[in-house]
Amino acid sequence: MSEVLVVVDHADGEVKKPTYELLTIAKRLGEPSAVFFGSPEQGDAVAEKVKKYGAAKVYVVDDAQIKGFLVAPKAEALQQLAEQAGPAAILLPSTFENKEVAARLAIKIGSGLITDAVDVSDAGVTTQSVFAGNYTVQAKVTTGTPIITVKPNSAAPEESEGAGTVEAFAATISDAAKGAQIVATQPRQSTGRPELTEAAIVVSGGRGTGGNFEPVEGFADSLGAAVGASRAAVDSGWMPHAFQVGQTGKTVSPQLYVANGISGAIQHRAGMQTSKTIVAVNKDPEAPIFELVDFGVVGDLHTVLPAATEKVKERKG
Amino acid sequence: MNIVVCVKYVPDATADRKFEDDNTVDRVGVDGLLSELDEYAVEQALQFREKREGEEITVTALTVGPEKAVDAVRKALQMGADSGVHVVDDAIAGSDYLGTSLVLAKAVEKIKADAGADLVMCGMASTDASGSVVPAMLAERLGLPQVTLASVVESQGDQVRIKRDNEGSTEVIGATLPIVLSVTDQSGEARYPSFKGIMAAKKKPLETWSLTDLGLDAEQVGLSVAYTQVEDTEARPPRTAGEVVTDEDGSGAGALVEFLASKKFI
């Protein structure tokens, strides 16, 4: 069976859930091999994690020559790995960075690229949600090694023991690939809440919060949810851009999306329309968001949310 | 110094966007415009020029697309770009990321030969395909570093520094020109064309190039040689609006929690 390369999504060796989703999808296409860019000391620990989801091999690529630069070195390393392994497909978690890595890789190895897939069939046919979620597109890579970036929550991770054989891969990084240097990095403070794109529940606030996100955050915490924001709230400086849901922010597809004080402009819909269940609280009964909802409350979020938060806490005891 | 800004003519997101029978995006039957996200790139190119007063810096707006796509270049000229290039050829229709980036790269190389291309600027994504991959592909094809998703752009001499929000951090990236640079909607509101700008744009040079002008053959681009194939497109059934209740004396919170509990979210 051919190898399918899966780029591991992790934060400093801590493997993230989309990795397991991608390994699950990779099993439909061949034998999954995880590709870990990181510190070689963390390789074994990562292998222990990913082999539970079927990784037969774990390529450990020392990122000492890679992590200080944008995108191009990773693309070079993947090109060299692809030439050695001859994979049936290459899957990457759909982040902005990985999409750019995939872009350069596609040119380097002359292969077709599909971005932001929400599903991949065993025949390699991808499903994408386009035009603000108004269309579903089925597509396939027809030339070269399929390179597919897959969005979080695209598959339920399925456990199945793989060999998890660790193999160090020594990539040669050219000087030309080191043209864009990361001069400084400031990690964002963790909110302690789930990651926006991976969360099962997202509670968002918009213009209607008037800048006070406490009711939104309180309700999110009662449900164990991530907090999001509309572009209006971000542009007003109420929330950092990292929390923005919509066309120019994050696209989320949780089990439950709760929109509070958000009118539901097309740019926002583009980021949340594929959520399984949608709930809205808004003062304006004419707000377009109500066209999308499974359940809506016409009311002031500043009174509805705190009361709802109390009731959720009561139920949870 | 010459800055090339890549701009895309896209179907209006507020219009009824759809696909043609061959599963390509309908770019003719739906009203189009300069992609909002590319307006930010034009704005940042103009600011780059304005901040470096006294230096000779020109801005060339470049688009690839059907006849009507020239509107995207015109808008950039009205905003303040100095010259425009429209690559139009029936054979380009249906190109995927690889085809589109090939045509753009050849056009940038041709502009470079005539006027220079020290900085190539793009928006963070198109508002139709939303791929965010063409800037990186363009950089790869041109053999240039890419500095992408900038929210703040600063430059001095041939040094460019940007700030950007990454997944879990804020980063400062540095690079030496020439580079491909993409900017986000956080980089600053794009200006509206002034009346003077609209009048002046009519006299600015605007060239139309075909594939032949770029040394490309029809067999190298377009739908028939795309590396990916769309097998099916289907309009998603509209969501049917569910129950909407009006909050009276605190009834809204109770109803909301009941609903969430009935769906097992609590």
Image (spheres, coloured by chain):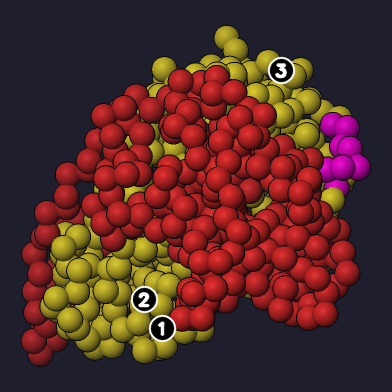
Q: Which residue lies most toward the front here?
A: B203
Residue at point 19%, 60% (across, down): A292
Quarter that holds the N terminus of chain B: bottom right
Disc nearer the start of the sequence (2/3): 3
Mark 2 chain: A
A288 left or right of B12 in image: left
Query: Of label 2 and label 1, which has the lower sequence position?
Result: 2
Q: How far apart are marks 2 and 3 (CA)?
A: 46 Å
* Amino acid at dot 3: Ala
Q: Which chain carries label 3?
A: A
Query: Are the residues flagged by discs 2 and 1 from a single subunit?
Result: yes
Vertical placement of residue A252 versus A263, above or below = above
Element under disc 2: strand
The residue at the point 19 percent across, 83 percent down is: A283
User: Relative to residue B182, is residue B163 depicted above or below?
Assistant: below
| Residue placed most toward the observer, B242 or A42 | B242
Viewer-side residue, A285 vs B109: B109
Q: Colour of chain B?
A: red
In this picture, which residue range is highlighted in magenta?
A171-178
Q: What residue type is labelled 2?
A: Gly
Question: Dot 1 corresponds to which residue?
Answer: A213
Q: Give the CA separation, mark 2 to mark 1.
A: 7 Å
Is B9 drawn above or below residue B252 in the view shown? above
Q: Residue furthest right?
A: A175
Q: Looking at the picture, how far across and down is residue B119, in whole percent?
A: 75, 57
The picture places residue B54, in percent across and down from the top left corner, at 82, 80
Question: Label 2 belongs to which residue?
Answer: A205
Q: Earlier in the sequence, mark 3 or mark 1?
A: 3
User: Can you identify the residue that label 3 sits on?
Assistant: A85
